[in-house]
Structures are given as C-alpha cells and as structure tokens.
Image: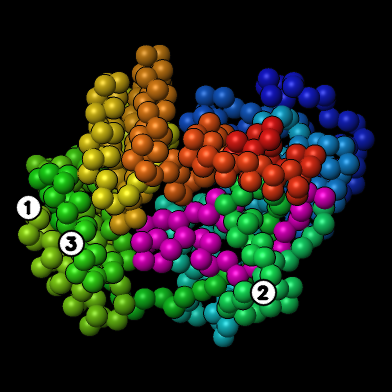
Amino acid sequence: MSAETMARPPLDKEVLSRLEEIFGKDRVLTNQTDLITYSYDASFETQLNPRKPEVVVIALSTEEVSECVKLANEFMVPIYPRGAATGQTGGAVSTKGGIMMDLSKMNRILDIDHRNMQVIIEPGVIQNDLNEALKPYGLRFPPDPGSANMCTVGGMVSNNSSGLRAVKYGVTRHYVLGMEVVLPTGEVIVTGGAKSKALKSVSGYDLAHLMIGSEGTLGIVTRLRLKLLPLPVTRGIVLCSFKQLEDAGAAVNAVFSSGLQPSAIEIMDFNCTKAVNMMKPELNLPIDNEAILVFEVDGAKEEVSSQVNRLKQVVEKYASHIQFSDEPEECEKLWQARKLVGAAVGLLKPGGFRVYGGEDICVPISRLPETLREIHNIADRYEIVCGIYGHVGDGNLHTGPVVNSNNEVEMENVQQMIDEIHDLAIKMEGTTTAEHGVGIVRAQYMDIEHGPAMEVMRAIKRTLDPNNILNPGKMALPN
C-alpha cells in the first residue's frame, strides 16, 4: 500500500460485500496485480509514484454508479472515476486508497440524432470511434486531442480537452449540450434540460459547464448530449519554415490580421524537426531553421484553394521555405510531420524517454517567441534535451524533455525544469494547463494562478461534496 492509502483506515469489509452486491463479484477487483494496473495514468508523476486503490469496480450503468456513490458517501470512502487513463496529470489515480471506478465499459453510442445535429453517448466512448460512427451522416464531434484513438469522451469532458483544431472550432465545452451526472450523494441529475433536444438554452444555471473541467471532483458523468458539426468538404495545408522564432510569431499574427481563419496552426521547433527527420527521413523537413509552422484550412474546395493561396502570400514575407497543397494525398504527406512529432521526440537522446511534464502550458500569442526561447534556456541550464511543439494559433505549447531514466541527475533536473516551465507560463500571463487538466501534477500552482477565485472553487466543492469523497486530492481542492 502507498503512503496515501495508509493515511486512512482499511476499507470496511461491509463495503466490499455491498460492492459485490452492486457489481457482481467478477466486476469487483481486489487482486494486487489488478490494483497495480490501476495505479497509473500516462503522467510522469505516476510513473515515479504509482498510487494503488483498495478496490476497483467496473461500472456498466448509471444505476450502478449511483448505488456505488451512495455507498461511498455513507462510509465516507473516496471514489475515483476513471476512463482510458490517457491523462497526463494523475487525475484518474487514487490519493487515499478507496474505490477506483472504471467507466470505460460504459461505451455505447445511444442515439445519433442527425436531424438535430446531436448525439447521445455514454462516457466511455472513444473519441475517434464516435467520429467514425458519425461519418456516414456527414457529421463530426470537432474536438480532436492527440490521443483521439485512445481517450474517452467522458475524460475529455472532465478535463475540457481540445486539440489541433481548437483555434477555429474551440474546445470540448463548446459541444456539450447537456449531461447526466451522479452527484456525490448518489442523486442523478440531467443538465441542459431534462428532456431537451434544443441546440441552445439560457434556462437556469449552466450546470453542465460547472461540471466540464471539474475532473470528477463534483460529479460522475454517465451520459452526454453533444452538439455536432458537418464534416468539411476538403482541407488544404501550408508548411513553412523560419530562420528565427520571432519570424514564425510574426507570420501567425500576419495571418490573423489578414482575416484568414485557419482550422489549425501548429509549430515545431528545430529539435522536433530533427526528431521527425530521424523517424521518417523521406519527409526531408528543412533543418536549417528555428521553427516550422503547419497551417491547415478547411471548407469547400474552391474556398480552400483560395485560402491556401492567400496564406502563401501572407507568410512568404517571413518564411525561408514554403510547401503547400489542397490535394488530399499531398496534404496528408505535409501533415505527417506534425502527427509524428509526439512520438518522434524520444529519439532526440539515445536510450532516452520523453517525459510528460510541463507539457501543456498556454501563453498569449504575442509572447510565444519569448516563451519558446526561454523554455530552451531553461532546458540548457539543466542540460536536458527538449523539443517544443504545439497549437501556436491559441498559444498552447507542448514541451518534450527527453532523459535517461537511470541517470539520477537527469531525473532530478527534469523535475526542476518542469517546475520552472510552469512558473514561466504564469509569468508570461498564461496558464499551466490548456488541455490536459490539473489533477495532482499542477495542483501546487492553482492558488498562484487563480488567487481568491480558488476559495470560490473550494466552497463549491464543499457544498456539493461535503464528505469529500469524489476524486479527493486533485486540483488543490480540499484533501
């Protein structure tokens, strides 16, 4: 057992017995091997400090979730909702033993209401699976995190996730019309109107948006009603390289000033370019530059062709190299570099692995070049190899430090580097997280980032969850 688990009394035998009544013995897991499996998410923090729950339950229905939460509240046992555990912040692991609730099997698409441009699903649906099911209707759920092939939509809602195309299409909260939620008492409510199929409403408090981004600390989502958009007819790509980071920043500002609205604007620094060329040499990305930008536009074919040409004209003043196309196959080739970079970064150091830490900051667009350069200065100071990439159109940067796990100095240095990157984000008038959430990893920065507003958040938590059973120890809320 971890120190966190030992901080509270062992789970009452009556609790285990009643869990078996709710879920059946085959969906109540207490084997140590199973518990170890549930002690991690994708974060560096849980790789260093795994946290085992005392029991895992696998939920299949709202009724089971409700009964389990009622039981946990009665005995004041902490309960931790979990989807695919692709998160980077320790948000879906135990901090005090207790009950881990696996929602990944609640994965049905319940109703594709294409006439009303919406869909009703359970929280365990994988994002990419949802969009594959929507394709025959010419529709899509626009948020597109890099983990779309793995992450659950429930997890996306819990963290208010986004991705490559947020610059045009926004984040998860812009597409949630309503949800069914189990509150910390076990009571079940529906937000957005109990029977509504409307695409908008200003009736009552916006409880859905209170739950979105709350990381399972205020309620457990068991059903979602999501807004959909039509699929774009086609896309076009402009890939540009820049001698200086400042030129890349100027090009982004020039594109916005021209009235163009790209669906994505992605940046890769010189280390990322090097890594992608190592993984896929045939891409032959320009290497004698400090940054590469990938612009994407979408819409009708004629509109895309026009936008690609306009983009080229705007950025050629700043770029040293430009490739562009509105042909699907060629666009896919140009887009490959950005798609590969997350995996490729680990190649920057022989025998190294990419650390997911300090990797989700967001700063004002005007301060991007300054921030990029300072991250490299921090990395150099700690002698850590680091690639930087991200969604430059909305200021969201992903840093990819690469270290050797058997090098104690590097392991210590990278943690200090991560801390400095988070501090830098706040210094640059930004945020420590723009996509992946707070969880355990960023809890220490919440008071600095939010000031007195944190007390309002804590008051909301105490009001809805006075026994503090839902995902305790996360987001700098009461422990």
User: For the residue carrying disc 3, how many other residues have a C-alpha within 10 Å: few (<14), some (14-19), or many (20+)?
Assistant: some
In the picture shown, does residue 120 fall above or below 376?
below
- Which span of residues is magenta-colored? 157-185
- Sequence-first disc among 2 and 1: 2
Dot 1 corresponds to which residue?
A: 320
The reply to whether dot 3 and dot 2 touch (C-beta < 8 Å) is no
Task: Identify which amino acid the numbered label 3 is placed on.
Answer: Ala
Compared to 58, does 78 lie above or below? Answer: above
What residue do we see at 69% from left, 78% from top?
A: 196
Alpha-carbon span between mark 3 and mark 2: 40 Å
Please give the residue where the numbered disc 3 appears in the rendered image.
254
Q: Residue at x 85, y 48 (%)?
A: 70
In the image, residue 146 lies at what x, y percent? Answer: 42, 52
Q: Is 443 situated left or right of 61 in this image? A: left
Quick check: 66 left or right of 227? Answer: right
Q: Earlier in the sequence, mark 1 or mark 3?
A: 3
Which secondary structure lies at badge 3?
A: helix
Q: Residues within 10 Å of mark 1 (few under 14, many from 20)?
A: some
Quarter of the image holding residue 454?
A: top right
Residue lying at the far front of the rendered structure: 452
Q: Which residue is mark 2?
A: 203
Q: Is residue 441 visible?
A: no
Foreground mark, 1 or 3, reads: 3
